Image: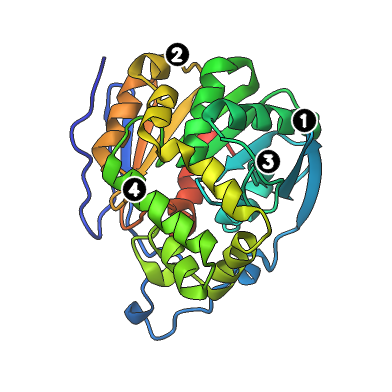
Amino acid sequence: MVSAGPPSRIPGFKSERTVGSIRAVTEPGQRQGADPTASPNRAFSSMWADLRQVPFAQRWVDAGGVRTRLLESGDPDGELVLFLHGTGGHAEAYVRNLGPHGQHFHAVAMDMVGHGFSQMATGSLEIADYVRHVLATLDALGVERASISGESLGGWVAARLAIDHPECVNRLVLNTAGGTRADPVVMGRIRELSMRAVEDPSWDFVRQRLEWLMADPSVVTDDLVATRQAIYAQPGMVESMRAALVLQDMDIRTRNLLSDGDLKRIEAPTLVLWTSHDPTAPPEEGQRIAAAIGGAELAVMDGCGHWPQYEDADTFNRIHLAFLGAG
């Protein structure tokens, strides 16, 4: 098995190197939503500004009996790229990616069961439950195969889907993916911030939950906070969050973890995308995951936390679209 050395992250420079089948890319650049103190002329940023010139739609579908919300852009008859969010997340994680991807694909961001504005969960949600929901969503969309891009929990779900249902996955992107380790400190922090935000969905608590995801907290916009606040204030959300957070219980998490043997079974062409400031695991974890997956590519984005697709959308979209074969 070929392994790569520590990814290079030199501020102000782009580096690209190939070691066997693993490619590491860093490109800090000027990210969308950077520190407002860096430029007095920073453009106003909001979700509506992100979608201002994007043809998109919001709708709900019945996915195996689960009322499921979708945000989508692009030709519905085109190749499907399905985006999966993380724990406590929702489709708005991808508002800065729908437009660029919709120019080449049918780009869909879904709210997984128990999350966002999809149907609440009443029982524990383990990885197999999410996989069933994603498969049912593919059925509802009338497609048999898709490229799946998952962030955090979404990456965990996407990887398990690719392992158990390889016939359904064209290409796979694991974006700061969960499911390969059990760090009690990180697990405790996710549980603490998430439960506090749903039990008391005040502006400050919801903002703090979002800021934990970012290397630069200033990229969290007011309308992103307001959207998550509305989601967390829904009736039944406290119980639904508890259902999702069972994966932060050590025993339950352990039986759902992806082993190196599991990762070796992934057949789909795979991009492992990591960041310099991910709060859940260092870049070396992304490197280890990529080394375990045959032929995987590795990209490390500098100056980003757990939401690189949002913090530095331009760089993410360029790397992501190139991997997907756009254009």
For the point 55% across and 49% down, the residue is 241
State the image coordinates of residue 51 (x, y, percent, origin top left): 66, 64
Q: Earlier in the sequence, mark 3 or mark 4?
A: 3
Q: Earlier in the sequence, mark 1 or mark 2?
A: 1
Q: Nearer the viewer, residue 314 or 107?
A: 107
Q: Is residue 133 above or below residue 317?
A: above
Mark 2 → mark 3, Cα distance in angstroms: 27 Å
Judging by the rendered image, the residue that carries numbered circle 1 is 64
Q: Nearer the viewer, mark 4 or mark 1?
A: 4
Q: Nearer the viewer, residue 238 or 171?
A: 238
Q: Nearer the viewer, mark 2 or mark 4?
A: 4
Specify how the rendered protein is coloured: rainbow
Judging by the rendered image, the residue that carries numbered circle 3 is 105
Crowdedness near tag 1: few (<14), some (14–19) or many (≥20) residues, C-alpha within 10 Å:
some
State the image coordinates of residue 271 (x, y, percent, origin top left): 44, 32
Q: Is residue 235 above or below residue 241?
A: below
What amino acid is found at the position of numbered circle 1 in the picture?
Gly
Q: Quadrant of residue 65?
A: top right
Q: Which element carries disc 1, helix, strand or loop?
A: loop
Callouts 3 and 1 close, C-beta under 8 Å: no
Q: Which element carries disc 2, helix, strand or loop?
A: loop
Q: Nearer the viewer, residue 295 or 67?
A: 67
Q: Which element carries disc 4, helix, strand or loop?
A: helix
Q: Which mark is residue 265?
A: 2
What amino acid is found at the position of numbered circle 4 in the picture?
Gly
Callouts 3 and 4 close, C-beta under 8 Å: no
Q: Nearer the viewer, mark 3 or mark 4?
A: 4
Q: Earlier in the sequence, mark 3 or mark 1?
A: 1
Judging by the rendered image, the residue that carries numbered circle 4 is 188
Instruction: Give the side of residue 148 with respect to residue 79, left or right.
Output: left
Callouts 1 and 2 close, C-beta under 8 Å: no
What amino acid is found at the position of numbered circle 3 in the picture?
Phe
